């Protein structure tokens, strides 16, 4: 099922329709046997254990595990222990974009490239994240709150900032056993922040290299080494994610989307999209609408 179908299975106090769903620990066991697709999913396991399949990969999670899943393939909840207590947060692209407001955890690309996107946490870290999620849940449950949506976005932003902080800390501990913060780490963090802010209008690597005071060649070498992909691939993935959202979630014309993403002309955007998605923007939009009409 998709996010909208899952939202319908829970009380109104669990969600903002067409935006976000938060499943609390006392409700989590109801996910056993369910399959979810086409949305981002955060899992925080507080106690017990569970097994999920994410695409073709099977993952075994236990207390202290945090997982960030951004997959179009189904995520299926296979098995859970009797003492399972976990949080499941499912924001859609629009809610995420509005909440973060051109901010992105500095090393989220590094986190996403892991074969198993799992972050082990200690008890203090879990408590911090649970505190933020409980604040989120409290505001979400107050359907009469005048600023309900805005407050939920604030708590989501705080949650994502804390996740970014934990990933940076743990990533540095893993990669710098000598205790030194390298120049490469500074370049990567700066590059990803710039991409999140400027990817719509700046598609050329030279722009980012100039802002970071390095050559395009050096930036390419550092990004490839740290993230396993080229700077262009990082920019491309952001453009494709935004283009996919605009085609599926809005009524904007192909011309308007092309202009919003600063392609020189609509033909260039169509060629770019088809090359990486296998369908033209028009065919992709048509296919998405047919799919939604049959679910």
Image (tube, grey):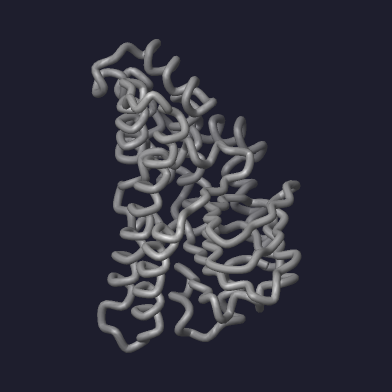
Q: Position of residue 137 (x, y in %)?
A: 41, 76
Q: Is residue 90 visible?
A: yes
Q: Residue at x 53, y 52 (%)?
A: 68
Decide which of 249, 55 is in the foreground and name it. Answer: 55
Q: Residue at x 50, y 45 (%)?
A: 241
| Residue, far bottom | 144
Displayed quadrant of residue 67: bottom right
Q: Position of residue 243 (x, y in %)?
A: 48, 45
- Image quarter (top left, top right, bottom left or bottom right) of the N terminus: bottom right
Q: Position of residue 21 (x, y in %)?
A: 50, 71
Picture layout, residue 132 above or below residue 214:
below
Q: Is residue 251 visible?
A: no
Q: Residue at x 32, y 37 (%)?
A: 193
Picture layout, residue 164 above or below residue 142:
above
Q: Residue at x 75, y 47 (%)?
A: 56
Q: How many numbered discs, if any? A: 0
Name the side, left or right, on which 78 lies relative to 251.
right
Picture layout, residue 66 above or below residue 143:
above
Decide which of 169, 141 is in the foreground and name it. Answer: 169
Decide which of 145, 127 is in the foreground and name it. Answer: 127
Q: Position of residue 212 (x, y in %)?
A: 26, 22
- Image quarter (top left, top right, bottom left or bottom right) of the C terminus: bottom right
Name the side, left or right, on which 75 lies relative to 3.
right
């Amino acid at each position: 099922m998709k996010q909208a179908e899952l939202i319908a299975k829970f009380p109104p106090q669990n969600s903002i329709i067409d935006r976000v769903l938060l499943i609390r620990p006392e409700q989590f066991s109801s996910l056993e046997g369910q399959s979810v697709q086409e949305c981002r999913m955060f899992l925080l396991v507080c106690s017990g254990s569970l097994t999920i399949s994410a695409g073709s990969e099977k993952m075994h999670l236990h207390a202290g595990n945090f997982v960030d899943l951004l997959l179009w393939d189904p995520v299926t909840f296979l098995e859970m222990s009797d003492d399972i207590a976990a949080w499941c947060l499912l924001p859609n692209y629009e809610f995420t974009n509005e909440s973060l407001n051109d901010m992105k955890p500095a090393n989220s690309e590094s986190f996403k490239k892991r074969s198993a996107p799992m972050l082990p946490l200690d008890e203090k870290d879990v408590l911090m994240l649970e505190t933020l999620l409980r604040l989120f849940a409290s505001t979400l449950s107050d359907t009469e709150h005048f600023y309900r949506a805005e407050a939920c976005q604030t708590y989501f932003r705080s949650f994502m900032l804390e996740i970014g902080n934990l990933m940076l800390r743990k990533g540095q501990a893993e990669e710098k056993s000598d205790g030194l913060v390298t120049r490469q780490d500074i370049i990567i963090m700066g590059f990803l922040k710039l991409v999140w802010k400027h990817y719509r209008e700046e598609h050329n690597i030279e722009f980012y290299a100039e802002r970071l005071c390095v050559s395009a060649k050096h930036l390419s070498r550092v990004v490839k080494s740290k993230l396993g992909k080229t700077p262009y691939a990082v920019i491309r993935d952001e453009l494709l994610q935004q283009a996919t959202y605009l085609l599926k979630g809005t009524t904007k014309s192909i011309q308007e989307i092309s202009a919003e993403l600063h392609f020189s002309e609509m033909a260039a955007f169509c060629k770019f999209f088809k090359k990486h998605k296998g369908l033209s923007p028009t065919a992709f939009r048509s296919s998405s609408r047919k799919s939604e009409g049959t679910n």
